[in-house]
Image (cartoon, helix red, strand yellow):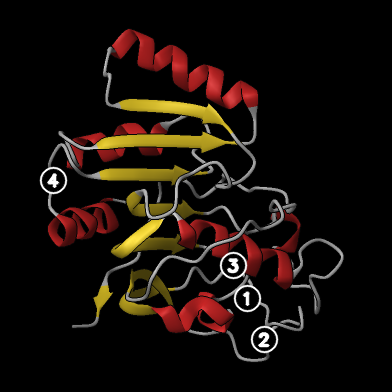
């Protein structure tokens, strides 16, 4: 995601006080890519799959970067309130079996779980920090916490990604753009949320060929 990572760096700046979280980091490619854009920041990757984290840690041990870390986690519940300047959840909140655009996703994904998981992620974003979402089957702006964020950046939606509403029904008109970068403008959200239970689809990780559309 070179455009999004460049946007994050230009918006936040780099430095030893910057802390970034890659949520659903798979085998760590996103974390190592972020390091090229943030050479001084502390960057953490978490993933539900222990095998993915083992591979990431093996690569890290060869690299020897003490400001990168990986951990097995199904959610962001263990992250401190307001502990990160930016959180990335790229191609995480989606299910690979929805590619045929079924009229409902309720047999695979639930909007309430998506919303609660985002509340948990939001809690660890500092006020003024950034939340990045890409290729999700639900829209962030449909959640109750969206009012606590300002939309900073939109990009064309992948036409192969169906989008569902709060009722888990396929939106009759698929949006051309999706919000991908949001700035937190309110205080941190407390509490703990249930773990995201949808199957993670990593097929689009690391590829983002669509041009950028930004808002001031």
Q: Secondary structure at mark 1?
A: loop
Instruction: State the residue at coordinates (15%, 34%).
Output: 40
Q: Earlier along the polypeptide chain: callout 2 or callout 3? A: 3
For mark 3, does the 10 Å Cα neighbourhood hold few (<14), some (14 to 19), or many (20 or more) residues?
Answer: many
**Residues at marks 4 and 1 touching, judged by CB atoms closer than 8 Å:** no
Given the current orientation, which residue lies at the most extreme top position?
62
Q: Earlier along the polypeptide chain: callout 4 or callout 1? A: 4
Name the residue carrying label 3.
Answer: 161
| Residue 157, x across and y down, in percent | 46, 73
Name the residue carrying label 1.
Answer: 163
Name the residue carrying label 2.
Answer: 171
| Residue 113, x across and y down, in percent | 71, 64
Instruction: State the residue at coordinates (41%, 52%).
Output: 88
| Residue 131, x across and y down, in percent | 39, 62
Which of the two discs, 4 and 1, sits closer to the camera?
4
For mark 2, does the 10 Å Cα neighbourhood hold few (<14), some (14 to 19), or many (20 or more) residues?
Answer: some
- Residue 14 badge: 4
Q: Secondary structure at mark 4?
A: loop
| Residue 26, x across and y down, in percent | 53, 35
């Amino acid at each position: 995601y070179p455009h999004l990572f460049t946007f994050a760096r230009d918006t936040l700046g780099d430095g030893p006080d910057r802390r970034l979280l890659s949520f659903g980091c798979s085998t760590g490619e996103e974390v190592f890519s972020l390091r090229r854009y943030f050479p001084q920041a502390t960057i953490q990757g978490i993933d539900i799959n222990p095998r993915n984290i083992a591979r990431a840690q093996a690569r890290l041990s060869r690299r020897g970067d003490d400001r990168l870390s990986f951990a097995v986690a199904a959610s962001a519940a263990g992250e401190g309130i307001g502990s990160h300047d930016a959180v990335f959840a790229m191609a995480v909140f989606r299910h690979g079996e929805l590619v045929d655009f079924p009229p409902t996703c309720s047999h695979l994904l639930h909007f309430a779980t998506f919303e609660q998981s985002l509340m948990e992620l939001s809690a660890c974003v500092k006020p003024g920090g950034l939340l990045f979402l890409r290729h999700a089957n639900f829209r962030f702006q449909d959640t109750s916490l969206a009012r606590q964020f300002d939309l900073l950046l939109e990009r064309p939606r992948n036409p192969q990604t169906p989008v569902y509403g709060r009722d888990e029904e396929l939106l009759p008109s698929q949006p051309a753009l999706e919000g991908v970068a949001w700035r937190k403008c309110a205080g941190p959200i407390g509490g703990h949320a249930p773990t995201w239970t949808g199957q993670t689809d990593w097929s689009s990780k690391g590829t983002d060929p669509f041009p950028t559309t930004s808002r001031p």
